[in-house]
Image (cartoon, grey):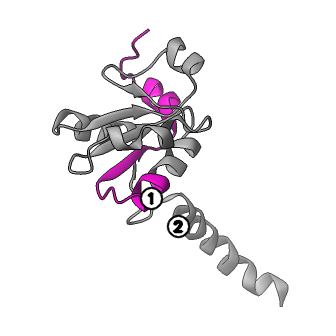
Amino acid sequence: MRNLFAPVRLSALPLLLMACTMPQQGTNSLDAAAFAVRLAESDAQLVDVRTAAEYADGHIAGSRNLDQTSGQLAQNVNELEKSKPVLLYCASGRRSAAARAYLQQQGFTDVVDLAGGIGAWAGAGKPIER
């Protein structure tokens, strides 16, 4: 009887894996290609939420450094325009996702973050400014 259900379980595995890796609607996280398009086509405010040391090691050209973990982003949130898109990134995507949630709580409506962070950006062959 166990062997009867084995093919069913095995055939369901790829579907389960695809569902876990597919981007979810409404997450506001973009891959490097979509992030680059969004950056090029708008008057977006590009914000790097990593530390100053990380920023100095390399960043996306035109970005502004507002460290999420030190509270610098919260201290300077009023310097960002709510009427313009905000594009966020960090090293891996975790801090920028937290920053996106924070900005949305503050009333920003067009906020996206770079999935995979600057590592994904560099991995996609996008330029890094040093």
Q: Which mark is residue 23?
A: 1
Give whichever of 77, 85 is nearer the camera: 77
Give whichever of 64, 118 is nearer the camera: 64
Q: Quadrant of residue 57?
A: top right
Residue at (58, 65) in percent of width and height: 14
Whole-percent x, y for residue 48 in the image: 45, 31
> Where 2 sits versus 75, above or below?
below
Task: Say what amino acid the circle numbered 1 marks.
Answer: Pro
Give whichever of 77, 121 is nearer the camera: 77
Q: Is residue 112 magenta?
A: yes
Whole-percent x, y for residue 92 in the image: 57, 37
> Where 126 sits versus 114, above or below?
above
Residue at (57, 63) in percent of width and height: 20
Task: Say what amino acid the circle numbered 2 marks.
Answer: Ala
Q: Residue under circle 2?
A: 19
Q: Quadrant of the N terminus?
A: bottom right
**Which of label 1 and label 2 is nearer to you?**
1
Give whichever of 125, 48 is nearer the camera: 48
Q: Quadrant of the C terminus?
A: top left
Whole-percent x, y for residue 65 in the image: 45, 26
Residue at (61, 34) in percent of width and height: 70
> Where 49 sits versus 17, above or below?
above
- C-beta proximity under 8 Å, tags 1 and 2: no
| Segment colored magenta | 101-130
Cα distance between the residues tagged 1 and 2: 9 Å
Whole-percent x, y for residue 113 in the image: 42, 45
Residue at (33, 19) in percent of width and height: 61
Q: Give the side of residue 77 with respect to residue 97, left or right.
A: left
Q: Is residue 31 magenta?
A: no
Q: Quadrant of residue 45?
A: top left
How crowded is the residue under tag 2: few (<14 C-alpha within 10 Å), some, or many (20+)? Answer: few
Q: Which mark is residue 81?
A: none
